[in-house]
Image (tube, rainbow, N blue to C red):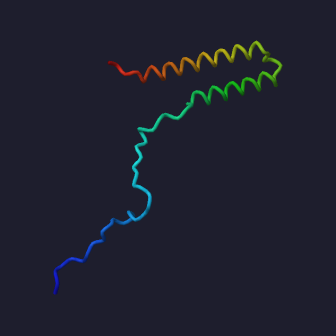
């Protein structure tokens, strides 16, 4: 009786393919353009525009006021989001 173990394959399973074994570091990927606040801002502007066109109570002045308030709120939210990412030295 022989105690020699059987021969092992020279290449590991799955290594015979022609593509490299790449591990992705998802935290190192660049940030995708856009953000959730921008989507909400655009949707809210579209909704207000539709209401301004459809309703008699909302005229162009009310639309401009609502658009200005939305723009102000959006810019403040982006400023707060960016300020929270500043590293203290």
**Residue 40 on image: x %, y %:** 62, 29
Q: How many marks?
A: 0
Q: Nearer the viewer, residue 78 or 4?
A: 4
Residue 6's place in the image compared with 64, above or below, is below
Residue name at image x 78 percent, y 18 percent: 58
Q: Nearer the viewer, residue 82 or 60?
A: 82
Where residue 86 sits, quadrant-wise, is top left
Residue name at image x 33 percent, y 66 percent: 11
**Residue 89 on image: x %, y %:** 32, 18
Residue name at image x 62 percent, y 30 percent: 39
**Residue 49 on image: x %, y %:** 75, 24
Give the left or right position of residue 69, taking residue 76 as reference.
Answer: right
Give the left or right position of residue 58, taking residue 2 as reference.
Answer: right
- Point out the image quarter for the N terminus: bottom left
Give the left or right position of residue 9, taking residue 53 as reference.
Answer: left
Q: Residue furthest front?
A: 18
Residue 10's place in the image compared with 66, above or below, is below
Q: Residue furthest bottom?
A: 1
Where residue 20 sits, quadrant-wise, is bottom left
Residue name at image x 63 percent, y 18 percent: 71
């Amino acid at each position: 009786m022989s105690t020699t173990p059987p021969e092992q394959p020279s290449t590991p399973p799955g290594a015979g393919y022609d593509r490299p074994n790449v591990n992705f570091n998802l935290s190192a990927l660049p940030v995708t353009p856009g953000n959730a606040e921008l989507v909400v801002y655009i949707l809210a502007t579209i909704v207000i525009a539709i209401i301004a066109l459809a309703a008699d109570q909302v005229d162009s002045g009310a639309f401009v006021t609502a658009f200005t308030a939305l723009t102000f709120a959006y810019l403040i939210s982006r400023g707060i989001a960016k300020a929270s990412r500043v590293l203290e030295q």
